[in-house]
Image: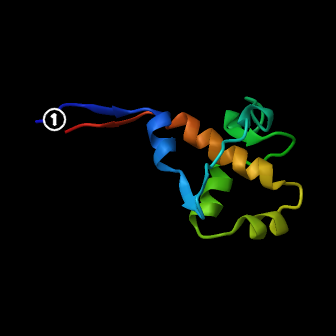
Amino acid sequence: MLGNTTFSITQIMFQSFIRKRNTYLCLMQVNYRKYIVINPSIRFGKPCVKGTRIAVYDVLGWLASGMSVEEILLDFPQLKSEQIRACLAYSADKERIATIAS
């Protein structure tokens, strides 16, 4: 029995480095707090993209269903690519500590 193992976001992000031609690229997180707001009077208090009624859940669902960022931007011209990355960063921040129970 191994007990509970906890991984920090630093450990997970370190594993996210990509090696390409002797340079390392890191998937940097955008400051989602500039783009994601929670207002009880909009979408029942779900986190939404600032200035829209588009919930983070919606954006994540579109990405999970296979839509590309470009397709989302075409369908929702009020969004910017940085706002889509902010939705991903928000989700990652909410799941930043993964606990694996043995």
- Check disc 1 and give the amino acid type: Leu
Q: Please identify the quarter of the rendering in which residue 44 is found.
A: top right
Q: Which residue is mark 1?
A: 2
Q: Is residue 43 left or right of residue 1?
A: right
Tag 1, which secondary structure? Answer: loop
Q: Is residue 22 above or below residue 42?
A: below
Q: Is residue 24 above or below residue 89?
A: below
Q: What residue is rendered at 49% in x and 38% in y?
A: 95
Q: Nearer the viewer, residue 97 or 66?
A: 97
Q: Position of residue 70 (x, y in %)?
A: 77, 68
Crowd class of label 1 (few under 14; some 14 to 19; many from 20; radius 10 Å): few
Q: What residue is rendered at 59% in x and 63% in y?
A: 20
Q: Residue furthest front?
A: 22
Q: Is residue 83 left or right of residue 98?
A: right
Q: Position of residue 57 (x, y in %)?
A: 63, 49
Q: Please identify the quarter of the rendering in which residue 32 is found.
A: top right
What quarter of the picture does the N terminus occupy?
top left
Q: Position of residue 41 (x, y in %)?
A: 77, 31
Q: What residue is rendered at 79% in x and 55% in y?
A: 81
